[in-house]
Image (tube, rainbow, N blue to C red):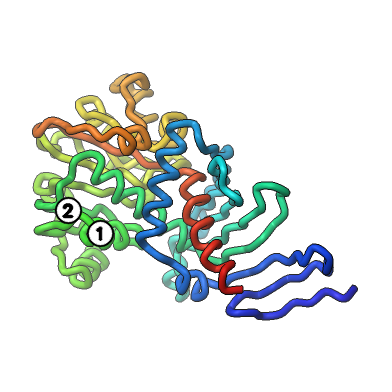
Amino acid sequence: MQKDNSIRNGAYIADDGDSERGSGVQVFDLDTIMAAYDEAAVLAAVERAIVAFSTGRAQTGASAHLMFDSPPGDCHVRSGSLHGEDVFVVKVASSFYDNPAQGLSSSQGFVAVLNARTGEPLAILQDRGHLTNIRTAMAGLLAARAIGYAGRGTIGIVGTGIQARMQAELIRRHLGAQRLLIWGRDTEKARQLADELGGEASALEALVRQADLIVTTTPSTVPLIDDAWIRPSTRIVAVGADGGGKRELDPAILHRATVVVDSVDQCLANGETGWAVNAGFLSPAALIELGSLLASPRAFGREDVVVADLTGLGVQDAAIAGAVWRSLALSV
């Protein structure tokens, strides 16, 4: 039987010719994906997935990571499934930092959605890395809330890229802020992002000393934030360190902080946590998983320094892609 490839309701259908089963992999472009995106539903799904991971009701596959020097960039391959769900996912997401100079987004990639009963591929979400960016920003929001940022103070964003913007927008929208400070190595980019978000460009030390919540979003491989700058009561959401030697925080910060991690194993291998443990500043036994904290919230002391170390979970990809795919499937 001749295979039929066609466009239906914004999705490219690659039919494998099996007419009895009616199979065919649906390929959705970014515009179609975002037309089906419901922020409230996806945020709830991501939170459930993080809790499920920490309570043994989800699994995430081993992560693969590639680093590139010329041009600079990296690529992550993640997978995840939630117990009882009808699909699981495999995600490829890359960040190539020189792309904007070529008129391209630095984020690229896709998500494969597969049937959890048969393993058959159901859809390719050509999200160009956008779903990864969303779920990362949502994890930052959930972590900020869980570690006690109440929304009445100053947010300091370290970085000027896609994740810097999304973390600032999502946290302010859901938790609030009186003031927003932005720092970047490129002072013009920092000023531009600050203007667009209604914030202020700042020197890094000044940002750290003033912010109630600091969100770090860079691909730095050397510490940017010095322990001496951190005042009591500071809350930090560290997003940038996810492999390849990345790090943004002085490990001594974690020595005096309560440390929350999205995954103990991943953060020991690839996050800020691993650097602090290797330096003798932190014991793995002291770590609190974010999913456990979301399931059983606790109050931190007013003067406590609390760091949330986020390396990204495959179950977050399963949650966001599954929620979007189900919405898309209803329209095809």
Say if residue 126 shows up in the picture. Answer: yes
Q: Judge whether 164 appears above or below 210 on screen.
A: below
In this picture, residue 100 sits left or right of residue 185: right
Q: How many marks?
A: 2
Left-right relation of 145 to 206: right
Q: Camera-side residue: 206 or 165?
A: 165
Residue depicted at 9% across the width and 48% down the height: 210
Tag of residue 126: none
Quadrant of the rendering where the C terminus is positioned: bottom right
Q: Position of residue 168 (x, y in %)?
A: 25, 59
Asked where in the image residue 275 lies, by quadrant, the reply is top left
Nearer-the-camera pick, 75 or 184: 75
The residue at the point 38 percent across, 52 percent down is 44
- Residue 244 in the image: state x and y as whole percent: 47, 42
Q: Is residue 104 left or right of residue 121?
A: left
**Mark 2 → mark 1, Cα distance in angstroms:** 8 Å
Amino acid type for the residue under numbered disc 2: Ile
Secondary-structure class at tag 1: helix
Residue receiving disc 2: 155
Question: Residue 323, how many percent across, how many down?
Answer: 49, 58
Which image quadrant for residue 234? top left
Q: Which residue is mark 1?
A: 168
Upstream in sequence: badge 2 or badge 1? 2
Q: Quadrant of the N terminus?
A: bottom right
**Classed neighbour count for the residue bearing mark 1: other residues with Cα under 10 Å, few (<14), some (14–19), many (≥20):** many
User: Secondary structure under badge 2?
Assistant: strand
Q: Which residue shows up at 31% across the image and 49% down it?
A: 140
Vertically, is 270 above or below 97?
A: above
Instruction: Confirm or deny contact between disc 2 and disc 1 (CB under 8 A).
Output: yes
Front-lying residue, 68 or 283: 283
Can residue 94 be seen in this snapshot?
no
When the figure is inspected, residue 287 is found, relative to residue 219, above or below; the finding is above
